[in-house]
């Protein structure tokens, strides 16, 4: 963990000015606000300037609540400050300008600085869309050594409430004045939290929406998921291509299984279940075991008494080459490194890499630090998660490249050990394309779907709460279906064990602990924002 940074999402007050045409920003262009020597001293000492106040809030119905398109695009001006620890020997005590900040807009534009705590970006086209965000939404990101990073989401149409009207800036000017939180040491009361701390937003200037209750703005999650979405490569030896959850459910049955019955019990609950159907069933009796098994709560430890999705017909096991059906399921949360973890999950109807079984979930994890930069990546294999630093991975821009084991679907950071000779290409972000192994364009892929948290799914992705297995029980543990993302066995640990693997050999079920921590779903999750005991374990278990 880097000791000097953290992340905050909050309110920045921005001032901008109209500027002549052009794209991006003009390095070193003045903001139309000349500082006197006295003003410079005031800014350095207290970060205050009485003559440069932020815009008054526009009265209701004034029509001044947003940007009116003009021939001259606006400038954003940023003046970050912080409140130091109280010191009776200081001549003044109050907000102090932050002189060594880095200010970015949407990770595309970087502000210039006047050296006295004012940062600006000019010639911005704020009404243009940003990939991965709702229309006219933008993120302003302020980082500085020793401070928690601050992130502000704003709607361009609401910037009128931040307009500067006192004549201190020429043109269409907007000012953000964020207050950063300094990470300090005693004798000051320390702010030791590194994790994103987001302003809850107000309807006028800043936005915040957290439908899955994980403490992170949903739009921030979706934007980051778009930025770091992987490019996935399947080889010419691939026999089971990707699908999506609804595609799979339309070709299967939800059933209950108990191997203590003679013969084994296979009871159908519903044919072609919907996602909600997966959560509605419960068994309270069976052969010699009367413990409850709920389809949206109970996880079988050894796949012996469980709900399951029946293997699809042989004709459907190859998956689909209709690439619009290839969806990538995103799970993101605040992590203990002060940033956000983004997981990208893929689903396949079948795995025929030796231990043939139905229903196969694989994925990759991108762990961001408290500056929203990649700290490390995790590649899901058959039994564990392979951790790699960014320089180990292959990249195309901010998109990590992932190679897939033919038939078995384990995720790899390189082609080493794979049998494929040529590879298809799948851009997983929304709007991304897919190409076949010979370079032929297959079409636009199915994009990203954020599933939210197990406690509060997003986008109606109720399947995430389903606790059964995604294929039929087989004659052995490894030839039976496996679990979905939130109950996944990969790298699972015995809870409160200090990292003891739940499935020691990965191929059997001898002496397995019943209470597990599902690392594939929760690795690095910050317990200050989510109930890790509930999110990362099953509510009840069965054989």
Image (tube, rainbow, N blue to C red):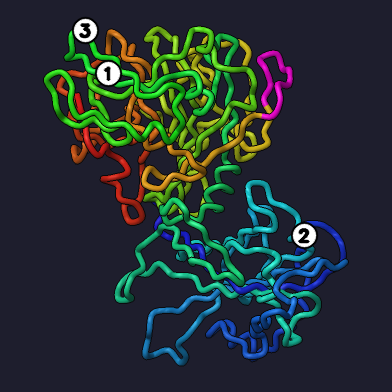
The region drawn magenta spans 434-444
Mark 2 lies on residue: 125
Between label 2 and label 3, give the one nearer the viewer.
3
Secondary structure at numbered mark 1: strand
- Left or right of 296? Residue 235 is right
Chain-order first, disc 2 or disc 3: 2
Q: Residue at x 31, y 10 (%)?
A: 474
Reading the image, the residue beneath label 1 is: 257
Percent position (x, y) of residue 28? 75, 68
**How busy is the neighbourhood of tag 3: few (under 14 within 10 Å), some, or many (20 plus)?**
few
Position of 235 relative to 249 (above/below)? above
Q: Say which of 48 and 293 sits in front.
A: 293
Horizontal side of 91 relative to 163 (left or right) equals left
Marks 3/1 in contact by CB < 8 Å: the verdict is: no
Q: Earlier in the sequence, mark 3 or mark 1?
A: 1
Q: CA distance from mark 3 to mark 1?
A: 11 Å
């Amino acid at each position: 963990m880097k000791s000097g940074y953290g992340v905050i999402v909050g309110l920045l007050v921005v001032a901008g000015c109209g500027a002549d045409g052009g794209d991006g920003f003009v390095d070193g262009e003045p903001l139309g606000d000349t500082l006197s020597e006295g003003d410079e001293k005031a800014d350095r000492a207290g970060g205050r300037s009485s003559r440069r106040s932020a815009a008054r809030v526009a009265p209701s119905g004034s029509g001044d609540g947003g940007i009116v398109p003009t021939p001259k695009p606006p400038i954003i001006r940023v003046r970050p400050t912080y409140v130091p620890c109280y010191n009776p020997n200081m001549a003044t005590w109050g907000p102090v300008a932050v002189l060594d900040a880095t200010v970015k807009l949407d990770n595309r534009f970087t502000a210039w600085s006047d050296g006295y705590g004012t940062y600006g970006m000019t010639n911005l086209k704020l009404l243009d869309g940003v990939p991965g965000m709702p229309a006219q939404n933008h993120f302003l990101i302020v980082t500085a050594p020793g401070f928690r990073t601050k992130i502000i989401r704003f709607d361009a149409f609401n910037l009128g409430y931040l307009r500067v009207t006192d004549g201190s800036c020429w043109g269409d000017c907007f000012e953000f004045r964020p207050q950063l939180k300094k990470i300090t040491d005693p004798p000051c009361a320390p702010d030791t939290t590194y994790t994103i701390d987001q302003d809850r937003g107000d309807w006028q200037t800043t936005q915040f929406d957290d439908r899955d209750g994980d403490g992170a703005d949903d739009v921030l999650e979706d934007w980051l998921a778009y930025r770091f979405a992987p490019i996935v490569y399947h080889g010419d030896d691939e026999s089971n291509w990707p699908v999506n959850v609804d595609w799979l459910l339309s070709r299967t049955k939800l059933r209950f299984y108990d191997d203590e019955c003679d013969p084994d019990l296979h009871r159908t609950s519903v044919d072609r279940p919907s996602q909600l159907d997966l959560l509605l069933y419960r068994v309270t009796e069976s052969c010699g075991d009367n413990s409850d098994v709920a389809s949206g709560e109970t996880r079988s430890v050894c796949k012996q008494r469980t709900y399951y999705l029946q293997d699809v017909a042989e004709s459907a096991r190859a998956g689909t080459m209709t690439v619009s059906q290839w969806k990538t399921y995103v799970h993101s949360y605040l992590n203990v490194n002060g940033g956000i973890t983004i997981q990208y999950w893929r689903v396949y109807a079948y795995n025929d890499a030796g231990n043939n079984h139905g229903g196969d979930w694989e994925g990759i994890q991108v762990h961001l630090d408290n500056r929203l930069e990649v700290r490390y990546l995790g590649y899901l294999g058959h039994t564990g998660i392979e951790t790699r630093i960014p320089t180990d991975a292959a990249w195309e821009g901010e998109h990590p490249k992932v190679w897939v084991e033919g038939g078995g679907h384990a995720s790899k950071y390189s082609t080493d050990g794979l049998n494929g000779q040529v590879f298809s290409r799948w851009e997983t972000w929304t709007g991304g394309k897919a190409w076949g192994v010979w370079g032929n364009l297959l079409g636009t892929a199915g994009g990203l779907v954020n599933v939210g948290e197990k406690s509060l799914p997003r986008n109606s992705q109720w399947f995430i709460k389903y606790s059964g297995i995604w294929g039929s029980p087989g004659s052995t543990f490894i030839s039976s279906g496996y679990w979905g993302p939130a109950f996944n066995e990969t790298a699972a640990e015995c809870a409160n064990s200090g990292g003891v693997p739940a499935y020691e050999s990965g191929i059997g079920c001898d002496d397995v602990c019943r209470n597990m921590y599902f690392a594939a779903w929760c690795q690095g999750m910050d317990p200050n924002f989510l109930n890790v005991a509930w999110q990362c374990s099953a509510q009840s278990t069965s054989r």
